[in-house]
Image (cartoon, coloured by chain):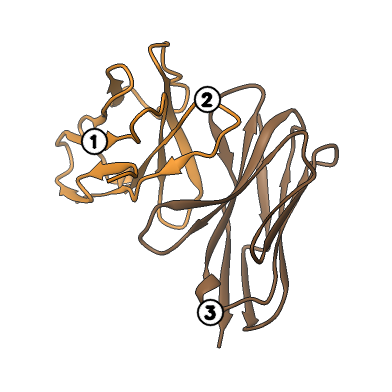
Amino acid sequence: KQEVTQIPAALSVPEGENLVLNCSFTDSAIYNLQWFRQDPGKGLTSLLLIQSSQREQTSGRLNASLDKSSGRSTLYIAASQPGDSATYLCAVNSNSGYALNFGKGTSLLVTP
Amino acid sequence: GAGVSQSPSNKVTEKGKDVELRCDPISGHTALYWYRQRLGQGLEFLIYFQGNSAPDKSGLPSDRFSAERTGESVSTLTIQRTQQEDSAVYLCASSPQNSGNTIYFGEGSWLTVV
């Protein structure tokens, strides 16, 4: 069974810092990996989708990398802003099934 | 609207009652997912529908849980004889196909069983 782990569970940084969120998964046979953002009381918003054949994806200040062989992905946020405060979730779409397997998330707080 | 729509947004029910949650996927999306998120926990997969294929029910936690979807339209998740541990937000998502595409989530139905 695919297990997805996110480190750290919580992170607080001052505005302007660059930061890295980590995601690891146990089964490297994946279709793709997605990073989502969840604001309190809200649903999930997809940030980046990386196919298994890709190494990274970029959107604005966000960059996600994927190392399938080692079962790792990172989400890099440049020049963080208070509006980036949210929970960031990593989810893996495995070859063995249809459902996305989610990590428990990293709760990010960016202070002004 | 263009997004995934869920109703009700909030539901408080008494223990032992049945509840029905509704999800309207994005038009044209063949894949539909239900997830559950308990307070402070990660997302748990419940059930997956893809077009007219048999659904993947492997995540349903007990026989009190069931879900239906007709074709590529609305889905309902039914919880019978609700228990306090059923309290959670129930999230629905849809995507154009089962893999390789971004999935889009609704804002969830917040269920509280008292």
Q: Are marks 1 and 2 on the same chain?
A: yes
* Amino acid on which disc 3 is placed: Pro
**Contact between labelled residues 2 and 1, with CB atoms less than 8 Å apart:** no
Above or below: residue B63 compared with residue B25: above
Total numbered labels: 3
**Chain identity for the colour orange used in the image:** B
- Say whether residue A110 is left or right of residue B107: right
Residue that numbered label 3 is attached to: A82
The shade of chain A is brown
Question: Residue B98, labelled with which disc?
Answer: 2
Using the rendered view, name the quadrant where residue B73 is placed: top left
Question: Residue B93, labelled with which disc?
Answer: none
Above or below: residue A99 compared with residue B84: above
What's the residue at 18%, 42% (across, down)?
A: B15
Q: For numbered disc 3, what is the local secondary structure?
A: helix
Q: Nearer the viewer, mark 1 or mark 3?
A: 3
Above or below: residue A47 compared with residue B56: below
* Amino acid on which disc 1 is placed: Arg
Spatial CA distance of label 1 from label 2 is 20 Å
* Amino acid on which disc 2 is placed: Asn
Q: Residue furthest right?
A: A69
Using the rendered view, name the quadrant where residue A1 is placed: top right
Residue that numbered label 1 is attached to: B22
- Say few, some or many: other residues with alpha carbon within 10 Å of mark 2 (under 14 / 14 to 19 / 20 or more): many
Q: Quadrant of the C terminus of chain A?
A: bottom right
The subunit letter for the residue under badge 3 reads A
**Contact between labelled residues 3 and 2, with CB atoms less than 8 Å apart:** no
Q: Nearer the viewer, mark 1 or mark 2?
A: 2
What's the residue at 70%, 71% (across, down)?
A: A78
The subunit letter for the residue under badge 2 reads B
Using the rendered view, name the quadrant where residue A81 is placed: bottom right
